Image (cartoon, helix red, strand yellow):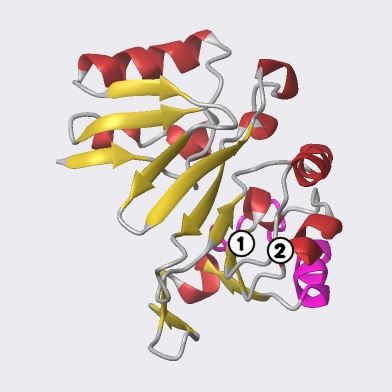
Amino acid sequence: MFDTLISPSSAHFDSDHVGAWPVIADRVDQVWVGPVLEDDHRDIATALTSAGATVLEVSAGTQLDVGDYRLRVVWPYSESFAEPGNDSSVVVSLEPSSQCGSCVSALFLGDLGEQPQRILMGRENLGALDVVKVSHHGSRDQYDGLYRAVQAQVGLIGVGEENTYGHPTRGALDILQASGTLPLRSDQEGIVTLSVDAEGQLVVWSER
């Protein structure tokens, strides 16, 4: 059994992010969720609790130390900033300890839209990172200034093959290119793993 599940790709209650929650219901001790704003959100949280998990509704400032890493929630700040849907995404910063030279730093943006991305950048001191999980499957609803600020080497895009939304969009890919960020797409690369080698260089392995 996992001690804690914090899934940055399942960062809010839309069905494409939480539809498979029964798979993990009896396998975790603790689950982090964003604002529980609607009845179906409460139903999922209640079912997870009934299965034995502790469900924590988190917001900016929540953090957890795991090994050489600190997981820090940077969005949402309160329910007043989060409407049901994409902008209620839990955004998590993955921060390695100063002693860990082989750790990867990352920012997982969930499905956060352009306006909350602007607010997030104004409130947080986001420095250069190794990896950014690109928001909303690479939709056009992005703030290019945030991507320029984090200067990630790699941008992870979780997106279905032949999806009808046109994700990732040309606009999102252009933002990554202008930021010097290499896009890695699940529809093209399959599963992707990231690590840091002995020289401190980011190493990428992909299924395809």
Q: Residue furthest bottom?
A: 199
Q: Is residue 80 visible?
A: yes
Q: Which mark is residue 150?
A: 2
Q: Which mark is residue 120?
A: none
Q: Residue furthest top?
A: 39
Task: Provide the residue designation for mark 1.
Answer: 132
Magenta-drawn stretch contains 27: no
State if disc 2 and disc 1 touch (CB < 8 Å).
Answer: yes
Q: Residue furthest front?
A: 99
Boundaries of the magenta span: 157-179
**Placement of 74 over or under 40, stated as above or below:** below
Q: Quadrant of residue 89?
A: top right
Q: Is residue 76 left or right of residue 93?
A: right
Q: Residue at x 51, y 43 (%)?
A: 72
Q: Quadrant of residue 146?
A: bottom right
Q: Is residue 120 left or right of residue 154?
A: right
Q: Is residue 138 left or right of residue 162?
A: right
